[in-house]
Image: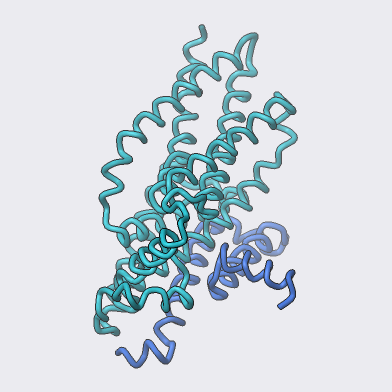
Chain colours: A cyan, B blue
Amino acid sequence: MQWAIVIAAFLAASVEFVEAFTLVLVAGITANWRSAIVGALAAVATLAVIVATLGVALVTLIPIGVLRFVIGFLLLLFGLKWLKNAIQRYSGLKFLHDEEAIYAANMEQARARGEAVGTRLDPFGVLLSYKSVLLEGLEVAFIVISFGSGGAGGIGTAAIGAAAAGVLVILVGALVRAPLQRIPENTLKFIVGIMLTTFGTFWSGESFGINWPFSDLFLLLLAALYLVVSALLITAMKRRQPRVASATTASEAPMLSQNKEVRV
Amino acid sequence: MNVILKVILAVYKFFVGDLVILLGTVLTMVILALINSVGALVSLRGGLGAILIVGVLATLVATLGREVARPENRQKA
């Protein structure tokens, strides 16, 4: 076995798997796990069809730049919306727990109608999980083909490295899932907003040919930058706004749900 | 309301729901595309990353600024 190819594919694929799994975790925690898993499995099925149909020609036929642009652009839209809402809540411009109350009231109404709650497919969760796994999965396929096309049996060897990376990332992700679910809702949504905006900026930038300094490590710097700017914005807005009451009553929630988006 | 309009509105609400975010992000992408394709702007290509980040942050500040400026929010202050 060519260990150099296995290790190179393992390391490169690990980065892509971590990026994909991060967003699947986000979808699972903020929407629900069923949506996240359905989205991820749908993306894996799409990938399987693409790889089976195109094979090695995948590298030349799939416009990865276009895909990066579309997904990056959508993530920017989602991320900025989440970040805006979280900053508004932290600064007191929006009720901190109103969406929890709205969500609880909606769940109560659904239960009253005899509908199953908590496991219904959430379009946001499915789409986020699907597009992240599809993009990163394609990048892993590119890595396997690029690293493995050097010699006979190379693709199989590179695939072993990439598969090992995938299994490792999924195992680690399963371990960190429980602690993540204990994070307060608005904090989680704030972090998600930062992450989606970071990934969106990174991928849409790559689609324009930007070579980010330090490659994928730049994601951390970008996230830190957005975190600092968001903290400054919260501080500035808090100075302007007195804190509003931190919760709304469940009885007001159904009325509020007619005017406000739910959970996002 | 027309069914097509309803669909467009539902898609808009699902993906964005905020006109400032949509316009700001689209404008940033258009600026990047122009810099990338117009020969006269070739000297700016080295700063594409910075322009993208500034565009994203400007969009965030603009949408939050609009929320702060809303009359109902001004009354809270």
Is A25 located above or below residue A251 in the figure?
above
Viewer-proximal residue among B14 and A230: B14
> At which x and y percent is residue A115?
47, 55
Asked whether the viewer can see residue A214, the reply is no
> At which x and y percent is residue B28?
59, 66
Relative placement, left or right, of B73 versus B23 is left
Residue at figure coordinates x 67%, y 57% from the top left: B36
Residue A22 lies in what quarter of the image?
Answer: top left
Residue at figure coordinates x 24%, y 80% from the top left: A243
Is A167 located above or below residue A152 in the figure?
below
> At which x and y percent is residue A30?
40, 53
Residue A74 lies in what quarter of the image?
Answer: bottom right
Viewer-proximal residue among B77 and A211: B77
Viewer-proximal residue among A8 and B39: A8
Is B5 located above or below residue A136 in the figure?
below
Residue at figure coordinates x 62%, y 62% from the top left: B29
Q: Quadrant of the C terminus of chain A?
A: bottom left
Asked whether the viewer can see residue A25, the reply is yes
> At which x and y percent is residue A197?
46, 57
Residue at figure coordinates x 38%, y 63% from the top left: A108
Relative placement, left or right, of A183 versus A155 is left
